[in-house]
């Protein structure tokens, strides 16, 4: 569960810390006090989008930190399967914002925003203000049914995902391969010409680089020869001023005095070494010059060979390796065209097997969905009645698509009738905003038994409801709070009265600066806050008594 929330330097929040408890945690406060900002902070810590102007004015950075205690065995296993280290059954998610950028961490290890979202999805389910609107999207209905049927559908959907991928790939290959006789002959002739052009060139990997080096040397042969001839003369022994001749003369002079001082022998040895190195260098230059001789014919042959290679590169690839690879692909394609009928039959046979297996899995998945849909209908209907939908009818309508998908061939849509005697119709045509909120709450309650997430956050689930309906919603929230931690922002006293822990979000002005703070209320303070919600600007003793009675009745409902 979410044990601790720490927010620093975000908009109106200079710094706030909340220690949540088990059961139903309720947050209330005046409009504009910062309730939405608090939920927005949680969304940030869960990998949501970052806004540059979110950091508090004058602050260098913003920070959100969530500390979770792991209470369900599946949570640790799921996190470790994602590659996160878990120690002492505690997980810390943090996000530090600086100038529109963020540093995201899970247990001190830096992760991407996507990694943060993956970890958060294991630990927490956040129901935003407008999430109930997703019920108007028919594709969401299939997701809900499959989530409810997860234990039965999981392995089947994994198998279908693999088989359907093969089916689509083979189908695409077959569609690309189907050619009439005229097209096949035309393609074969063209590929034969290309392959022949590549094979006749008899290319050798690395040949182009070798030839380009030789061509460069030949192109600058005159300059190389002139330069090396000069160097050979300057370092040789034919001229009195040449380096080799001068070193030889120096050796002769030095040898005449070495008998007078033993240390001079070391200098003599060094000069001998220089003479030997220079002699070797001069001989290597001479050898190089002797190999520089080549005819015009050899130069032309190299030039023509390079032209051939570069021509093939322009047509078939940027490098020799790519040209050779293209040739190999062309050869394989020609073999396919030569054995066209056989290849077609092979593809058709493979496609038929993949299609049969896909159909088989889709059928099995559909059968599971049909069975689970009946159970889901009854459960959601029961919860809707609890939520003050009297005479409600709810159906999970399924139709078969004309094609396969990665999710099977079922098209699912929720139908509802909220008034006795009326036929069921799609949610989008019947439900109002307040009704959608309650329907989503019913769905969340049903899925709670299927879900391993230990914390659920509801941001203003009470939109569009009041009176007895609000009371029913509060009882449903308390019911969910018995099996997992619930955190809820609300404007309704009926829901706030059910709180196991009641927190007040309030705005204060200090030193001409507006700040938002959050504090946990005592039992007496909670009654006072309920009275504020009930009575508005003027709180009378009668309103206080009503608030106190509401708390007493709520306590009785939770027993």
Image (cartoon, grey):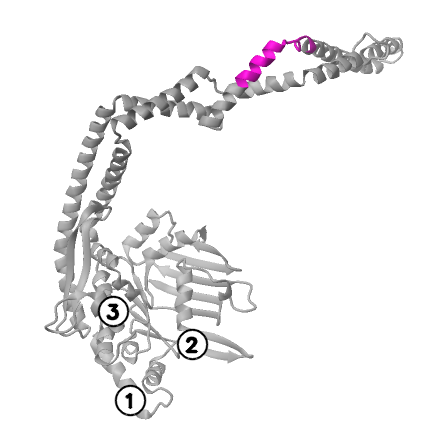
Q: Residue at x 32, y 25 (%)?
A: 186
Residue lying farthest to the bottom in this orientation: 541
Q: Is 130 on the left-hand or right-hand side of 104?
A: left
Q: Main secondary structure of the magenta part?
A: helix
Pointer 1 residue: 545
Is 295 covered by the magenta stretch? yes
Disc 1 + disc 3, Cβ < 8 Å: no
**Which tag, 1 or 2, sits closer to the chain's start?**
2
Pinpoint residue 219: horizontal percent, then vertical percent.
Answer: 65, 18
Is 241 covered by the magenta stretch? no
Label 3 residue SS = helix
Pointer 2 residue: 33
Residue 380 in which image quadrant = bottom left
Residue 199 or residue 256, whichever sits in front: 199
Instruction: Give the position of the N terminus as an image quadrant.
Output: bottom left
Q: Residue at x 48, y 72 (%)?
A: 12
Magenta highlight range: 289-306
Residue 536 in which image quadrant = bottom left
The residue mark sitting in front, 2 or 3, is 3
Pinpoint residue 39: horizontal percent, then vertical percent.
Answer: 39, 67
State the CA–CA distance, disc 1 to disc 2. 26 Å
Pointer 3 residue: 436
Q: Is residue 460 above or below residue 122?
A: below
Q: Residue at x 28, y 53 (%)?
A: 74
């Amino acid at each position: 569960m979410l044990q601790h929330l720490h927010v620093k330097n975000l908009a109106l929040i200079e710094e706030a810390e909340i220690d949540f408890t088990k059961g139903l945690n309720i947050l209330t406060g005046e409009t504009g006090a910062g309730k939405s900002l608090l939920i927005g902070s949680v969304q940030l810590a869960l990998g949501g989008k970052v806004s540059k102007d979110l950091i508090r004015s004058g602050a260098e950075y913003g920070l959100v930190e969530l500390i979770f205690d792991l209470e369900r065995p599946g949570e640790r296993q799921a996190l470790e399967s994602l590659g996160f280290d878990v120690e002492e059954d505690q997980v810390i998610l943090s996000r530090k914002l600086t100038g529109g950028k963020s540093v995201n961490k899970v247990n001190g290890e830096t992760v991407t925003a996507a990694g943060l979202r993956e970890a958060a999805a294991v630990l927490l389910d956040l129901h935003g203000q407008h999430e109930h609107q997703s019920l108007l999207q028919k594709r969401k209905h299939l997701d809900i049914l499959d989530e409810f049927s997860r234990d039965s559908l999981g392995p089947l959907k994994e198998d279908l995902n693999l088989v359907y991928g093969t089916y689509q790939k083979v189908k695409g290959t077959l569609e690309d391969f189907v050619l009439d006789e005229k097209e096949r002959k035309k393609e074969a002739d063209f590929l034969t010409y290309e392959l022949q052009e590549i094979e006749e060139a008899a290319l050798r990997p690395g040949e182009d680089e070798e030839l380009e080096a030789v061509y460069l040397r030949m192109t600058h042969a005159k300059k190389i020869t002139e330069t090396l001839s000069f160097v050979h003369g300057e370092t040789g022994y034919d001229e009195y001023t040449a380096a080799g001749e001068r070193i030889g003369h120096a050796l002769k002079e030095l040898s005449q005095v070495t008998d007078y001082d033993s240390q001079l022998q070391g200098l003599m040895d060094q000069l001998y070494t220089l003479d030997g190195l220079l002699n070797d260098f001069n001989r290597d230059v001479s050898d190089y010059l002797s190999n520089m001789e080549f005819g015009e014919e050899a130069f032309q042959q190299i030039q023509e060979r390079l032209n051939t290679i570069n021509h093939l590169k322009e047509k078939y690839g940027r490098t020799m390796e790519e040209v050779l690879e293209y040739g190999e692909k062309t050869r394989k394609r020609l073999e396919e065209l030569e054995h066209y009928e056989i290849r077609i039959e092979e593809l058709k046979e493979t496609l038929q097997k993949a299609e049969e297996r896909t159909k088989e899995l889709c059928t099995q998945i559909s059968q599971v969905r049909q069975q689970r849909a009946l159970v889901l209908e009854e459960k959601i209907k029961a919860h809707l009645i609890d939520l003050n939908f009297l005479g409600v009818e709810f159906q999970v309508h399924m139709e078969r698509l004309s094609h396969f998908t990665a999710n099977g061939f079922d098209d699912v849509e929720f139908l509802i009738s909220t008034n006795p005697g009326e036929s069921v119709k799609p949610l989008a045509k019947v439900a109002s905003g307040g009704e959608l909120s309650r329907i989503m709450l019913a769905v969340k309650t049903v899925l709670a038994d299927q879900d391993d997430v230990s914390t659920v956050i509801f941001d203003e689930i009470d939109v569009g409801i009041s009176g007895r309906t609000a009371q029913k919603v509060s009882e449903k929230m308390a019911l969910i709070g018995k099996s997992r931690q619930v955190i809820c922002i609300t404007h309704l006293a009926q829901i706030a009265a059910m709180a196991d822990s009641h927190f007040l979000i309030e705005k204060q002005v200090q030193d001409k600066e507006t700040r938002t703070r959050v504090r946990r209320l005592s039992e007496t303070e909670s009654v006072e806050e309920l009275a504020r919600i009930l009575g508005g600007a003027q709180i009378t003793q009668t309103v206080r008594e009503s608030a106190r009675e509401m708390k007493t009745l709520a306590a009785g409902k939770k027993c």
